[in-house]
Every structure is written in structure tokens, then in C-alpha cells.
Image (tube, rainbow, N blue to C red):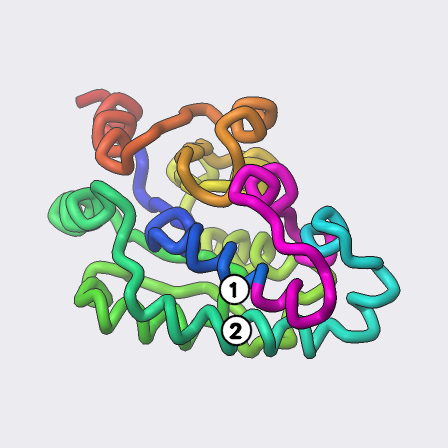
Amino acid sequence: MIKLVAFDWNGTLLSDTQTVLNADNYALKTLGYKPVSLLKFRKSYDIPIINYWTNVGMEKSFFKKHMYEVEDLFHSHYEKHALRCRTRGGAREVLNWLYGQKIPSIIYSNHVAQRVEDQLERLKIKKIISKILGRSDLQESLIHSRSKQQKLHDFVKNHKFKPHEVISVGDTQEEIEIGKHLGYHTVAISGGYNSTARLKKHRPDFLIHNMKELITIIKKLNGK
């Protein structure tokens, strides 16, 4: 019986893939690096974020020395343009359905929690999200990635959910790996930050192309 759905935010519930790519390229060009294509982005995006920047051509030593500058350049561009981003297709329908079924929806993200909350307010969906698990500020989790996993694990444990009662939903291999490591069901959605080929390689329990497909999956897992 599914009793909790944990969604990634960027690229999963929020349709911001192109906005992130544009902000990445702004930072790359400002720092003297070549911009990347959407195809390259989807092949390269990884967490910890240092892996992504090195995958697109930035030297590891340069990133470690200038990580805060890189973050500031990215966010100064991203936050302005993210105000025009909408939810992914089917996301509102799924969130409202889960709310009606009394199945809590939470967000676990590498993004700053307050900025996610601001977006939820703007999009008028805050009331149907039970909890936001995110970074406390821009500096948290720049190098390491355990924070996102640990926060989800602690939330599930503190609320006494069993692993088989939880679904992890995301657009990258990170959410698949976290879900598998913690024993949750894993649902990967295409069209976000990772290519479909990469998602398939990490063998999620389910691969969907529209968020509305999640309703059918939950009904099946719940024997309905």
C-alpha cells in the first residue's frame, strides 16, 4: 500500500530544464567556457554538482576554488527566469489526486527549500504539498550529495512509513539510486535533466513520460 510519494522538484514537478540549461550556459560563458547543448546537458547532469560541471568541461580544481561564484552566476540568471516556469504536464492532476486520496506528497530537492516554497506559492499548489525537504542555503551540499537522501530517509523513519509504502519520483538517476538504496519504489520521468537512455540504464521500477501515468501505477500497487 503506497502511503507517501516523494517527488524531486526541478525537472520533475517543475518544468525548468531549458531554464536550467540557459543558466548553466550563462555561468559557463561568463567564466570562459563553451556553452553546452540540451543533449550534452542530459548526458552530463549529475550529483554531486561538481561532477556535472567537470563533465561539461570545467576543471575540478577551478570549480573547487570558484564554486560559490559558479553558484551565484547560475542562480542570478535562473531565479529570474524560473518565475515563468510552469509545472510538468499532468503534475497538478496527480498532486490533486493524491491529496484527495489522503496520500501525502512531499518534495525532496537539492534546491533551497525556501525558494521551492516560493514557487509553490506562485503556482498555487503549496497547500497540497505536505513537506519540502531541501537545502537551507546555496552553500549546502555543493560537493556532497548525501543531504538529500538523508533528509528523505529521516522523514520516512520519523513518520514511521515502511520502505515499501514509499515511492520516489524523479527525472534523474539520483532519485532512482536514492529510492533503490532506501528500498522504495522508483518512478523515473523522461523529459527532464537526464536522457531516457540514462534513466533506463539505472533500471527504475517504472519509467513514465507524463506524470499522469503515476496514478495508474499507484492504483496498481494498491491493488485497485
Left or right, 84 with reference to 75: left
Judging from the image, what secondary structure is the residue with disc 2 in? helix
Residue 189: percent from left, percent from top? 40, 35
Write the residue at 53% across / 23% down: 200
Q: Which residue is mark 2?
A: 75
Question: For residue 44: magenta?
Answer: yes
Given contact means CB atoms under 8 Å apart, are the residues at marks 1 and 2 in contact? yes
Q: Tell me the quarter of the picture where residue 176 sits.
A: top right
221 shown above or below 91: above
Give residue 23's mark.
1
Residue 82, horizontal then vertical, whole percent? 37, 67
Farthest residue, direction right: 61
Q: Secondary structure at mark 1?
A: helix
Residue 183, image x, y percentages? 54, 35
Q: At x 43% / y 59%, what residue is drawn?
A: 19
Within 10 Å of disc 2 (Cα), the crowding (few <14, some 14-19, many 20+) is: some
Q: Nearer the viewer, residue 102 or 144?
A: 144
The magenta-colored residue range is 26-51
Label total for image: 2
Q: Quadrant of residue 166?
A: top left
